[in-house]
Image (cartoon, helix red, strand yellow):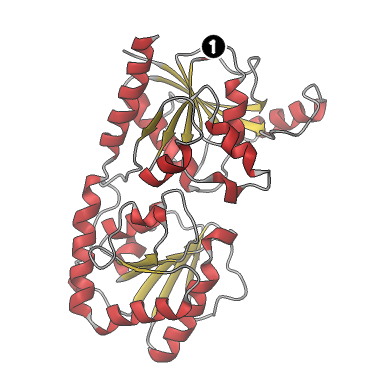
Amino acid sequence: MKLRINIVIPYFGSRAGGGLKVMYEYAKRLSVRGHDIVIYNSIKTNYGKDYDKSRFSLKYKCFVKSLKGRERPRWFDLPDNIECKMIPYVSDDYIRDADICISTWWATAHHISELNQSKGVKFNFIQGYETIMTSEPEDFVHDSYKLPLIQIVISPYLFDIVSPYAKYQVEIIPNALDLSIYELTNPIENRNSKTIIMRYLSLKYKACQYGVAAFVELNKKYPDLKVIMFSSEKKPEYIPDWVTYYYDRKDIIPLYNEAAIYVATSITEGWHLPPMEAMACGCACVCTDIPAHLTYMVDGENALLVKPEDVDALVDKISYLIDNPKERIQLAKRAYQSIKKYDWECSVDQMEALFINTMNLK
């Protein structure tokens, strides 16, 4: 069965982001399987706030963005047969009739729930506990779980959060990696244990300042320490000059393969792809023991875990791996093996089957 699938995104991602990357990956792989995909980038996704839907400025802004090519992401290689559209807001007027309509944000979930049934069977793809990622009342987020949509979550911990609110079906489909891209090219044994890598983002819940503070302390202990950071944001002033910082670098696979240790300091995440990417490329991980990391990490087995915001613990765990290279190598090898089960084709199989089974039940 070949499906017409509408994917509604709450904003246009001009820079790489994990949640959008996942949606684009599903779009690409479902398209390869013969499904007809249209991606809608909504300019207005406010829920609970009034705005003039007939306002000329909103439609003009949409028109200008379209002219500037702001409909297709430049950082992700979408197939040409996937149509991308910029729309002023989510409405029957702007979204085509289809078999499936899927959103990936609590506000767009509310909006697609109001669309005509002709726009497709409706799904909400939940990639994180969005209360911490919005300034709106948390009831708005919880209410999105109660909507007459099929809820898809990416992990068991999100299932446990969503299920008590949900009045309809909730499914778990885990995130994955393209293991043909994230490859181990530099043997783990060949790496300098004092080479550390971390992705930087200024978002509060990423808590990157704790990682930087740990690096400063480690630099006192190991003067030849090498820290690599990469980001879609320009380097903030508080990061020391001796840190190698890559802004907007497209190819990070060589960086992962150069490093021995990957560090993640997040207070919360939906899934968190970069540690997975690093593990697939041969890094040993020191990460916070948050539910998202626990989805695919086991402390002492394929990663070392610390409490969030604990700089001393970060320093201790990283120092242990530096001082014990054999343990670091074994940890990285176990991580590399453990991550192989998260293959994209398995997740797309589940998503496609869910769509088709739902259509067959109509």
Amino acid of disc 1: Gln
Look at the image and tell me in which quarter the C terminus lies.
top left
Quadrant position of residue 184: bottom left
Up/down of 270 relative to 26, above or below: below
**Eyeballing the image, is 82 above or below 183?**
above
Q: Tally the numbered discs.
A: 1
Rendered position, 248 above or below 50: below
Q: Position of residue 304 (x, y in %)?
A: 31, 69
User: For this view, does 331 lie left or right of residue 45?
Assistant: left
Residue that appears at 30% across and 44% down: 178
Q: Nearer the viewer, residue 74 or 131?
A: 131
Query: Is 223 or 160 nearer to us in this picture?
Result: 160
Where disc 1 sits, the SS reads: helix
Q: Position of residue 325 (x, y in %)?
A: 22, 79
| Quadrant assignment, res 143 | top right
**Seen from this angle, which residue lies furthest front?**
164
Residue occupying the point 37% across, 21% down: 355
Which residue does the numbered mark 1 point to in the structure image?
117
Q: Is residue 304 visible?
A: yes
Name the spot of residue 91 as percent of width and height, x first.
Answer: 65, 19
Q: Residue 337 location in percent, x, y?
A: 19, 56
Classify residue 137 by image quadrant.
top right
| Quadrant for the N terminus in the image | top left
Judged left or right of residue 74, residue 170 is left
- Horizontal side, residue 150 vs residue 11: left or right: left
Q: For mark 1, does the 10 Å Cα neighbourhood hold few (<14), some (14 to 19), or many (20 or more) residues?
A: some
Taking the spot 25% from the left edge, 68% from the top edge, the residue there is 300
Q: Looking at the image, which residue is at 40% across and 90% down?
A: 221
Question: Is residue 69 shown to the viewer in this render?
Answer: no
Task: From this view, report whether residue 172 is shown above or below residue 309.
Answer: above
